[in-house]
């Protein structure tokens, strides 16, 4: 049996600007996104029959047709006319529903693996276009470690910037519904002035200065939808520790540090004080 395995990385939205609402009801965004070294593992194994199946070591993750990885496999098979079975195995380390893009990354990684195991020869751009049909965050995982996504997410621009930092993640056991967060944004859209991506990137040589410029338009709506999340973010600041930012529509929070020891100290303090799972992750874009 042919089996291939690949790591499936998470992402954090360093910035997230909601730029408007489309006629179809979806929101347009502009977001500076970084891949981080928190990864799931995805394996694909050729089956002797024509079935497409998936399993996951996290019981919270559905293993039916709602799973993005199996949807990716089915979409690819139908697009290229492949009639071969495959079994997908997901080993999860990225917490679901945290705004870290785990499901989207799994879908992108599945497409890459099947492109290899089925010997399709599709380009990265072709796979990214197919991924865009599955979810807004899927295309970015076919790009570099730092990129800007626009529109619904299919418009992805690689960014060449020398950003070296350590991300301390706070991963509360809180689920933020993305539709609910966007609905809250609709009710009280924050039109505050935001720095341009170019201004933010110009500061990436200094991690503290860079961190000060980061923002997320969905932060306030997410805190409204999930008051405990807003309380946690506020309590971290009130305790005298650095302010955190939200990634995506939540619920993961992060702060960037210049060195690993400072990130580790911060993460340990948050975990000990609030009983929240934390992680310290390298962020390196060059």
Image (tube, rainbow, N blue to C red):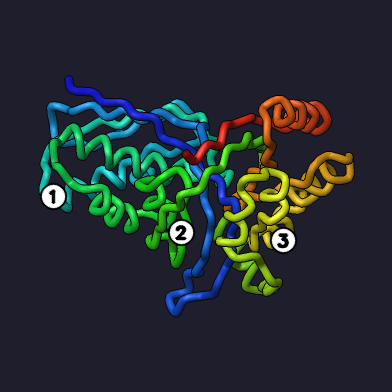
Quadrant for residue 134, please give it: bottom left
Q: Residues within 10 Å of mark 2 (few under 14, many from 20)?
A: many
Vertically, is 118 above or below 237?
above
The local secondary structure at tag 2 comes to strand
The image shows residue 147 at horizontal and vertical percentages of: 46, 52
Quadrant for residue 271, please give it: top right
Q: Nearer the viewer, residue 111 or 254?
A: 254
Vertically, is 211 above or below 89?
below
Alpha-carbon distance for marks 1 and 2? 27 Å
**Given this view, does label 1 or label 2 mark the residue nearer the observer?**
2
For the question of whether residue 170 can be seen, the reply is no
Residue 80 bears which disc, if any?
Answer: 1
The image shows residue 4 at horizontal and vertical percentages of: 26, 26
At a point 66% along the width and 57% down the height, the residue shown is 215
Q: Which residue is mark 3?
A: 220
At a point 23% along the width and 53% down the height, the residue shown is 126
**Given this view, does label 3 or label 2 mark the residue nearer the observer?**
2
Q: Nearer the viewer, residue 62 or 38?
A: 38
Name the N-terminal-most of marks 3 and 2: 2
Q: Which residue is mark 2?
A: 149
At a point 53% along the width and 40% down the height, the residue shown is 96
Residue 275 bears which disc, if any?
Answer: none
The local secondary structure at tag 1 comes to helix
């Amino acid at each position: 049996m042919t089996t291939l395995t690949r790591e499936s990385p998470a992402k954090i939205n360093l910035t997230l600007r909601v730029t408007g609402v489309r006629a179809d009801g979806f929101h347009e965004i502009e977001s500076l996104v970084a891949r981080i070294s928190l990864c799931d593992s995805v394996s694909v194994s050729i089956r002797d029959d024509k079935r497409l199946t998936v399993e996951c070591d996290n019981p919270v993750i559905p293993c039916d047709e709602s799973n993005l990885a199996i949807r990716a496999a089915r979409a690819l098979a139908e697009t290229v006319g492949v009639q071969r079975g495959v079994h997908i195995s997901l080993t999860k380390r990225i917490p679901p529903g945290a705004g870290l893009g785990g499901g989207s990354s799994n879908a992108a990684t599945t497409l890459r693996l099947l492109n290899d195991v089925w010997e399709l020869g599709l380009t990265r751009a072709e796979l990214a276009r197919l991924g865009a049909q599955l979810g807004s965050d899927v295309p970015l995982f076919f790009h570099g470690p730092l990129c800007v996504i626009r529109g619904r997410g299919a418009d992805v621009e690689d960014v060449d910037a020398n950003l070296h930092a350590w991300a301390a993640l706070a991963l509360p056991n809180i689920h933020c519904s993305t539709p609910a967060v966007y609905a809250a944004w609709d009710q009280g859209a924050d039109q505050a002035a935001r720095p341009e991506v170019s201004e933010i990137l110009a500061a990436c040589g200094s991690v503290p200065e860079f961190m000060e410029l980061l923002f997320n338009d969905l932060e306030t709506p997410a805190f409204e939808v999930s008051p405990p999340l807003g309380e946690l973010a506020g309590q971290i600041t009130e305790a005298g520790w650095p302010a955190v930012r939200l990634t995506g529509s939540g619920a993961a929070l992060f702060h960037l540090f210049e060195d690993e020891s400072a990130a580790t100290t911060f993460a340990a303090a948050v975990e000990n004080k609030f009983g929240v799972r934390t992680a310290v992750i390298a962020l390196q874009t060059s």
